[in-house]
Image (tube, rainbow, N blue to C red):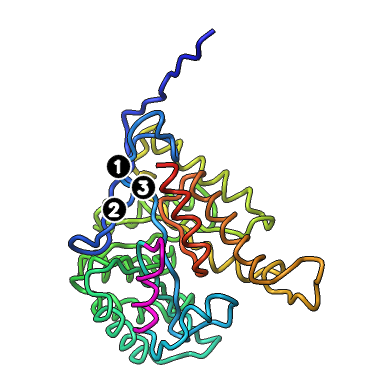
Amino acid sequence: MPFNQKPEKFAAKINTVTIGNGDKAIALGGESVLPLYTFDGPIDNAPKVGVEITDLGVEDIPGVKAYYEGCGSVADMAKKASEMEGADFVVLSLKGGDPNGEDKPTEDLVAIVKEVVAALGDYPLVVEGSGNVEKDNELLTKVSEACQGTNALIMSAKEENYKTVGASAGLAYGLNVGAESAVDINLAKQLNVITTKLGVNPEKIVMNIGNAAVGYGYEYVVSTMDRIRNAALSQNDDTLQMPIITPVSVDAWSVKESMASEEDMPEWGPAEERGIGMEIMGAAADLVSGSHAVILKHPQSVATIAKMIKELV
């Protein structure tokens, strides 16, 4: 008996958000089908892969450190990251501004952002804050000014500071705004609602619904992402029709499976291979669950996920 394919069609669609300018710009979202369901309908904008760097310089991660050898500045790293095989955009994390860490002055971080913007030109840029809400109120306001005209994505607007980030990035300087919540569909929806009520265009909002490393409560990420995508399409919930971006690298390289040395855990094999595996598994699972963009660090992870996307879309 022949199999008759019955496409699942939705009247709703995911918003399209553009990051960057000109020929190098990328578009997230825009589809009316479930994640990677190309057999149900077209996916004009394939998922994208970003490469994360930080203001702290080259990280001591096997393979990553070697890739950036010879880079004398963060701007040099940004340029090298943009040339990585499979890369679609660069993510600059300003973790050095965290008061509980190096507590770099805002002026120093903004100067780095300006250098990165100059080095990348029209290449798509995402900027993450320090992770400290109070510091980011000031920092991301000035970062938004430094990124004016780039159509960058400024991460992250949280419930505690969405007014400041939304007003500066989304309203004052016309940039894209990353709405960050903590693996909960209701929190994600609420943040989108209040951010749009602030006046930010829904088509300038990208959701970061949170993430976890595989094996560390990751099932909550999958279920939350799945519920968001289904509500957006099957229920036509326009408060959840923003594309999703997922920072995979932070969680993947901060768990014991990636950090433990081969000397301590010889049965686990080389640390570099373990970290790459954690990144690839996490990114692949995020993409099939509903993410439109994943953020990675290792060149092999980036190339592998980019190849997977190319073969599936």
Read off the residue under disc 3. 46
Q: Secondary structure at mark 2?
A: strand
Mark 3 surroundings within 10 Å by alpha-carbon count, few (fewer than 14), some (14 through 19), many (20 or more): many
**Which of these two is toward me, 43 or 251?**
43
The picture places residue 187, in percent across and down from the top left corner, at 48, 53
Q: Secondary structure at mark 1?
A: loop
Who's the residue at 66% across and 54% down the image?
Answer: 217
Q: Work out whether mark 2 precedes mark 3 in sequence or the reverse, and give the earlier one.
A: 2
Q: Are marks 2 and 1 in contact (CB under 8 Å)?
A: yes
Task: Give the residues drawn in magenta, as a range.
Answer: 75-87
Mark 1 surroundings within 10 Å by alpha-carbon count, few (fewer than 14), some (14 through 19), many (20 or more): few
In the picture, the disc for residue 27 is 2
Task: Classify the position of the C terminus by image quarter.
Answer: top left
In the picture, the disc for residue 57 is none
The picture places residue 80, in percent across and down from the top left corner, at 38, 77
In the rendered image of this protein, does residue 94 appear above or below residue 251?
below
Mark 3 to mark 1 CA distance (whole Å):
6 Å
Read off the residue under disc 1. 44
Who's the residue at 36% across and 81% down the image?
Answer: 139
Residue 229 found in image quarter: top left
- Horizontal side of 257 relative to 111 (left or right) equals right
The picture places residue 148, in percent across and down from the top left corner, at 20, 74
Mark 2 surroundings within 10 Å by alpha-carbon count, few (fewer than 14), some (14 through 19), many (20 or more): many
Task: Classify the position of the N terminus by image quarter.
Answer: top right
Amino acid type at mark 3 = Ala
